[in-house]
Amino acid sequence: MAQIFQQVPLDHSRKETRFLRLFPAHCEDEIRTELFTASVEYDIPDFKALSYAWDLDGPKRYIAVNGNPIEVPGNVFVLLLKIRRHFCGTSAIILWIDSICINQEDIPEKNTQVPLMADIYTKASQVLVWLGDGNECTDQAIAVMNNVEIWKEGVVVPDPWEGDTMTSKRASFRNLPHLLDIVPIPIDSFLKGLNDIYDRGWFRRTWTLQEVALPQDDPLILCGDSTLSWKCLVISQRCLPQILLPAMTKLPQMRGIVTNANNYQELVLQTQPFKEEFETNFEKYEDIIDHSKSLETAIRTRSWHQDLPKFAREHRFGDVEPLSLHIHTTKQQLSTDPRDKIYGLLGLASDLVRRHIRVDYNKSAKDVFIDTFKFLVSHKRGFQILSRAAVPRLSEQPGWPTWLPRFDTYPEEDEAPQQFIWEYSDRCSVYQASLGLEPNFRLVDSDQVLILYGIPIDEVTQVTERDDPTNHPKGWKATRLDDPSTPEMSFLASKPCRFCIKCREGTYDACIERVYCPEIFELGQNSKLGKSVWASCTFTHDERGYSWYKWHELESEGPPVSSPGGRCRRINDWKYSFQEPMKEAVHQTFTGNYVAKNAQWVNGVLMFSRSQGVTTHHYRNPSVVVSSVGGVDNDGTFGNPWFDFFDDDFDGVPNYRKIRRYNSDLRHRSMFYVEAGRRVFRTSNGFIGFGPSTLDAGDKIVVIAGADVPFALRPDGDFFTLVGECYVEGLMQGELFKQQPEFTKGEGSFEIKLRQFSVR
């Protein structure tokens, strides 16, 4: 193959690439092709680009390229046969296929050709997706999905912008009578074929995402001798809950119930007999739901990229967010080369990103990930990406810094906790522990050690037992409240009440309330926590309207001073105290202050307020108070997949009931979000919270400048190792700084004392 590449050299100054001309022939004839060059910028021909999953371990076959026999992977050989049969006709067809058009053994060539793939797939007349050989079940399933007019008529298709199709927008029971006409074959055969399609390796590869996201026209999917339009594939995925429903219950009997039901309450009562059968069969079809998640990633990636101007406008996205968003959504995607977990996304990124992160296969995966880390921290103005690091249950890699995310691998969804802060989150959009302070960092010791700055809070003194997240029941059910050490920690972290009416009247013995009142004394006096530095902070706005506290380290380490007028001062060691009822603190901790976490999910829906019958001992914190932990709605419908198929707009459901169910839904989501895979902890000065499953007594809780959540660091000689992000009640909304007027007013400049931490 190297000889062929030498015969067809590339002029990189003209952005040339190779194309493959496939000649027509009879089915049994040799595959004859011609390799030639053209510029993707000046004289690009009309061509089709191919997208497929590489098969390096499969059998090899031979084709003729420029008259010479060339070895190619077996799946590429079969794909070329299919294309010749269905697309060539009497004239040749021009293709672009990476395994033949790029010399994969020539690193300098790869470094110039891989960045051109964005232009190649954008300018292709059509992208052909090859899923592999088909069978009777896949052929039947594709035939059903191709009947797009029947799918569209009378079926409510959830909006792809509204998030997960199984939970965000409920499929309507009013569509059920139409389902019998949609699937003319046995439902089990159809679902078997559908599961076979969804389980193909193509859906799990990283490179395939940009290959289907970039084309202007929808890709065409090939599976054996069957073809499927991208549009039909998307519609079938959007309607998956309705597709599964006939297989899970007695649809003919339900058909009459649904048609004749007068209101929501009547529908609930009359369908109860089918509920147990539905839940039993739901587990039977979990595989197809799991396999469909990779397809959902591909669908969303194409939708986001094609509608990027709209998406960027509505979500205030800039040049950096698309990359950080795709890094987050492709955590479970695979790549043979770990560097391709980043390089495979650059075609979907902005020019700014591609200027800073350049394709270079001479670099190690670690160096590529460090480049990505530095770019995201600097341009996102925060340590959001740090929340991705130190994920539990990842295999140890010698010499890998704990602060550097493993972009190439990630545990299964039920084996790792959900991140409090996502890679693409805006600063202070969910939590704001450091209240908008910009990150200030540098890398030393051959980029092995991360120097950062922050305020040490306290030391962990007690943690619950480690919990295996795989033991959690599926659903949003709390588990840590049942841990016997949890109430003990809560009691030890609390103090007797001295603020209510009874206490103010002097009848302390009559008051049984406890108060959450953590304190911090003499911040930063422990020399083991790193040297102290003075930082000058200035409040500023950027072009997008975000507020920041820009700062730089000062040379002087003299005593605190005040400038004329008191507008500039050094914040030295201060006594921090935060007070609220212990019941409220526990509620907020176990839900992660669910209003903050779910603000983006609520989207204007009325939330619980104190006027809705919620009573507590007294209030010190303006955050929302939940009235119970672990409860369910009176109608018993919360968190049940059976009722996920009801439409939120079903006639007869009063608005207040929708709101109540939605809030209960969010609260339970948040409890599972916070608890799964984490441990409850208490610090010596009375803080409580949730930390990683690897958290231990002796770890330090630190508010890092530039981070929206506190982090746990573990002392390691003169250094620290990163344990992971934490939820600490009383620190999540910048309470540590809000007692200083300069922070809350956003005026002038001031100085603050921070500690330097060396993390490796």
Image: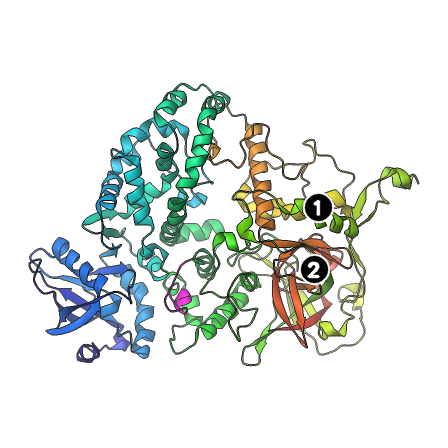
Q: Which mark is residue 747?
A: 2
User: Which residue does the image show at 34% across and 24% down from the upper left?
Assistant: 252
Give the quarter of the figure containing the C terminus: bottom right
Is residue 666 part of the magenta span, yes or no? Answer: no
Residue identified by numbered label 1:
586
C-alpha span from label 2 to label 1: 35 Å
Q: Tell me which amino acid carries mark 1.
A: Val
Give the quarter of the figure containing the N terminus: bottom left
Is residue 337 part of the magenta span, yes or no? Answer: yes
Left or right: 460, with 405 as reference point: right
Q: Secondary structure at mark 1?
A: helix
**Relative height, residue 634 to residue 474 (above, below):** above
Number of residues whose C-alpha sits closer than 10 Å to that of mark 2, classed few (under 14), some (14–19) or many (20 or more): some
Give residue 316's position: percent from left, percent from top: 49, 53
User: Which residue does the image show at 47% across and 40% down from the upper left?
Assistant: 167
Q: Which residues are magenta?
A: 333-344
**Relative height, residue 245 to residue 539 (above, below):** above
Give residue 589's position: percent from left, percent from top: 67, 48
- Closer to the camera in the image, 607 or 525: 525
